[in-house]
Amino acid sequence: MRNPSRRDMLRGLGAALALPWMESLAPFARAAGASPAEAGKPPVRMCCWYVPNGVHLPAWFPDHAGALVDLPPTLEPLAFARDHLSTFHGLIHNTALTNGDDEGCGHGQGAASFLTGAQAAKSQDAVRVDVSVDQLYARHVGGATRFPSLELGCESPRSGNAFGYSGAYKTHISWRTPTSPAPYELNPKVVFDRLFTKGTNSLTQATVADRDFYRKSLIDYVRDDADRVRRAVSTNDRRKLDQYLTGVREVERRIQQAATAADLPGDFARPAGVPEDFDEHLRLMCDLMVLAFQTDTTRASTFMVTKEASDRNYPWLGFTDGHHETSHHGNDPEKNRKLRAIDRYHVSILAYMVEKMAAVEEADGSTLLDNSMVLYGSGIADGDRHDHVNLPVLLVGKGGGAIRAGRHHKLRAETPMANVLLTMLQQAGLPIDQFGDSTGTIPGLAV
């Protein structure tokens, strides 16, 4: 039987199930032409999350600079990953400020500048900002993966113009070019089929349709190939493979359940695969990002939890006030309590994904979390003021050993957030010394 290789498995598993990194594959990958570094060292993954409307700042920042010991209430869900966590105090996006525009739209400008470090052009039609950090990284490494990048979101991207600015600024954080935002996909079923089917030919389409009709699992289509792989790899890698296939089946099952649960009476179309339960929607998207990274299907991803200025409510937290409405707190204690609950909930969803990443073992014994950089934050600091000073931003992961994590960085006031983005790009291997309005890198963040 032909020996497996990393590349053969990417091409040969029936319906295009990519494989996780396994130590058994390194010799075959080298034989197929990969360098020792490529064959043995897991790649760095970059993931950027966005939450809208700012946060309740007093519950966000750690008290002391240096080693992270006690986390503030909002960040407590990440306590288990403290050694992989980097937090920052003093960041600003100068490019999100009105800068002479008396009718600046704090929401659109904050989101547009978040990953670009650039000023959004005031126009309702001809949008212009700059290429975002995720897309620069995708250009650098995307040729090695099936998809250069993956853009996800959990809320409709429709949004009206405001104060002379296009609504596109409020609904996009990823920009492929200064005038071309990268739209996100919000249907988990579409994302799953995109990740785990090969191409868009009629055979692939028939396979997906057949799977939907008979409720068959993707695993059923690749069982023979999976058995072949099991026979060719080590005992430890067999465990990894079984864990991975179980994870794929679990995500597939939940997507199928979401589609079934979404049946509506009358003439309403079924939202195929988008859960009615928003919490489940968020978690499915997290699982899909982890699978995409685990299999090296992509190395760059963005996740817009909800669009900027979203007024989504979270009744399972015990209240139905909209997020945007709550963010305009006016220092009302009750509104601030609810805002803290929303903030902590969002961080708990991040923690859900981080925990999954920490459980994925890579070929060299490190974890997926060790080899990732997960940026999380908002382009607005205090939602009541629509300001962009002292932004709530954190970073999880060690970037393959290039990030010195486990610390709170108390920075000089009004340090450009683009300095964080520049540091990430440099530590991910990009030979650049400027990004957006950066003035340098973050002291002590790089190893």
Image (cartoon, rainbow, N blue to C red):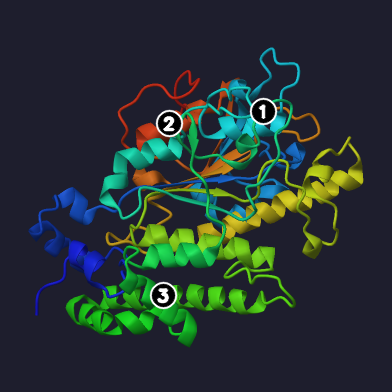
Crowding at mark 2 (Cα within 10 Å: few <14, some 14-19, many 20+): many
Please indicate whether residue 349 sits to the left or right of residue 5 in the image: right
Q: Residue furthest front?
A: 267
> Is 344 in front, or is 298?
298
408 relative to 121, above or below: below
The reply to whether discs 1 and 2 touch (Cβ–Cβ < 8 Å) is no
34 relative to 239, above or below: above
Label disc, if present, on residue 423 of the rendered structure: 2
391 relative to 37, above or below: above
The amino acid beneath tag 1 is Tyr
> Is 368 in front, or is 85?
368
Residue that carries the numbered disc 1 in the rendered image: 165
Could you say where residue 345 lies in the image, as x and y percent from the top left?
Answer: 70, 56
> Is 44 in front, or is 263?
263
The amino acid beneath tag 3 is Val
Give me the residue at 84% from left, 48% from top. Answer: 337
Q: Secondary structure at mark 2?
A: helix
Does residue 444 show up? no
Residue that carries the numbered disc 3 in the rendered image: 208
Give me the residue at 41% from left, 62% from top. Answer: 194
